[in-house]
Amino acid sequence: MTAQVTARTPVREVSPSQRVGPAARGRALREIAPVVAVLAIAVAATPLLLGSAGLMDTSITIATFAIMAISLGIAYGLGDMLSLAQATFGAVGAYATAIATTSWGVSPWLSLILAIALPAAISYGMARLIVRLSPLALALATLAFAELFELAVNEGGDLTGGYIGIGAIPALPLPNPAVSAHVLGWVLVALAMLVALRLRASNPGRALLAIGTDSVLAKSVGIQVNSHLAATFSLAGGIAGVAGWFYAHTRGYLAPNSLSLDISFMIAIAVIVGGRRTILGPVVGTILIVLLRDHVPGETSHGMFYGAGLVAALLLFPEGVTGESWAARWRRWRSRSSSDRLVRTLGARKEGKA
Amino acid sequence: MSIVAEKVSVEFGGLRALEDVSIAVRPGRVEALIGPNGAGKSTLLNVLSGFVKPTGGKVYVGDLDLTRAGSHQRALNGIARSFQTPRFVPHMSVEENVLIGFFPRVGGRLLPPVVGTRRHRHEEEAIRDRTRALLEEFELTEVADTPAADVPLWRLRMLEIARAMALDPQYILLDEPAAGFDEQERDLLSRQIARLTEAGVGVLLVEHNFGLIKSVSSHVTVLAQGKFLADGDPAEIDSHPEVVEVYLGKEEH
């Protein structure tokens, strides 16, 4: 203990109250930087994408899945709840808006409310039942829900269109549909990032980190662990619903297998590879995995590439690609011989898991 | 209004950890709780803070029966605590760790921070101001931005008390807060405890160091093997033959 004793009367050049203002502002600016960067890059890329329908389509796909990945970043990165149903919550929102706009003639803008509220309500109810479970059991419960939902829409008759699905979902009434969908998609991504960012820096966000680290600590300061986790899961479900709404109105067609389990798995991998604890992680992970998916051959062998990619990412970047500064990573790698590099990464992986 | 444990018993699978033990923590007073290892001190503290449910007996705050209330409800009723091994979020800064303590005050609603309501911003500013004051008070200002994992033990113990104070508690239960402290650190702690009692906070102090107890406490309860052994003022306890035999005689103090 004696070695740990440090000077008790530090010299302070500025009093704490004086350095608050600029520091807080600087902190706010630094925190918002990734959001601004993502939006700026997406908007700047628009002219480049204009020439190619394929590229525009890829951008819209990435934006859709990135919103779902950000929602999982909230549930899994902040709340430690690995959901394998984020695409399904998206599907709940997508079906809600598809039915409302095609059968009842509701405006797509109005049905956005439904597309958020319904998955948020369902995920809240579900979370109340499953937040007590162990992490693995919780993930399996979400997986079971995904299967059940797919079964239900398959058997949904005229309401859901059964296995044929729902076609002719109206596009968003915007000028120049392709460009506006691309821009709107990335604006939604930026908004979702902003939600995640603000949540992380707030009282409920800090509480989530406390719960994730140590639920005894969380309870001792008066946090109602289960209801707080359920509310968070519900928020994530609502954001996934936004992605589903966007999907339905940009694709114009929705079937039971449109937003099914394989998409949820892809999103989970994107979040893990990108870094579940950072704001940028889910977005970077989604970009990587969608580009990988589009450029590897053979639909049936995708699973193999996902699996290999996941294992490689976990070994190389236990906290995700964005989980640690690249400068620090480079310094560490250069300073070590190749033989203990593997030991080091395996060790780091263990720490990351603990 | 006091926090009272009345004839509390706790059994862990046939093992009697506590047997008919009573204790009261009064506002503005320090109730010291001592006893050899395995005496049931931490168990009693866990009963008071709701982490262990007693198999017999009651826990009251004033007239309010909290025997069955969960641990977070105890916190909401003004009972804060520290842990024998400090608990904290390692990758969060010391400041953020203290901010966690304001959870009940701000509440857990997700939409106000996400939407960024004016009221939420004001509340966040207010708790950050209060946190800075607490950091100053517990000599943590210079490590405010340091990850909690990187600060020494005495600071972690101060962090726990600062976080507990964020709750604006009526009672604070300290589980061996001076373990591993040198004399200087103990002095700081006893000054902080004196300030708590001046502010009207009732303190339960589980402690081995009799010097610290003498300097802050007016009443001591002694447990041995899960049972009440003796109580009285520190001087009485220091010379109590049975206490000396089971406890003090074996400890250097």
Image: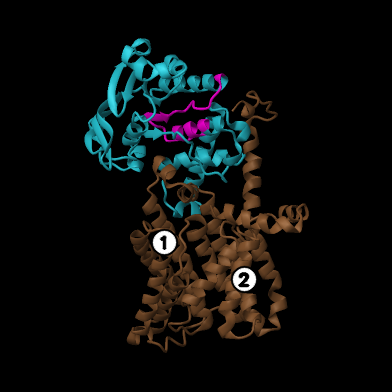
Q: Which residue occupies the foreground of this view, A25 or A62? A: A62
Q: Specify the color scheme.
A: by chain
- For the record, the magenta segment spans B157-183
The question of residue B45 being in magenta is answered with no
Q: Residue A36 appears at what percent x and percent y? A: 65, 60
Q: Quadrant of the N terminus of chain A?
A: top right
Count of numbered circles on the image: 2
In the orientation shown, which residue stands out farthest toward the bottom?
A164
Q: Which residue occupies the foreground of this view, B198 or B106? A: B198
- Looking at numbered disc 2 in the image, what kind of residue is underneath it? Gly
The residue located at (67%, 54%) in the rendering is: A344
The question of residue B158 being in magenta is answered with yes
- Looking at numbered disc 1 in the image, what kind of residue is underneath it? Ser
Give the residue pinned by disc 2: A309
The residue located at (34%, 59%) in the rendering is: A128
Q: Quadrant of residue A102?
A: bottom left
The brown chain is: A
Q: Is residue B105 above or below residue A320?
A: above
Q: Is residue A211 above or below residue B242?
A: below
Give the residue pinned by disc 1: A234
Q: Is residue B133 above or below residue A77?
A: above
Badge 1: chain ID: A
SS of the residue under disc 1: helix
Q: Colour of chain B?
A: cyan
Q: Residue B183 appears at what percent x and percent y? A: 55, 19
Q: Quadrant of residue B44?
A: top left
Q: Decide if residue A325 is in sight here.
A: yes
* Nearer mark to the viewer, of 1 and 2: 2
Local packing at callout 1 (Cα closer than 10 Å; few below 14, some 14-19, many 20+) is many
Q: Residue B244 appears at what percent x and percent y? A: 36, 15
Badge 2: chain ID: A
Local packing at callout 2 (Cα closer than 10 Å; few below 14, some 14-19, many 20+) is some
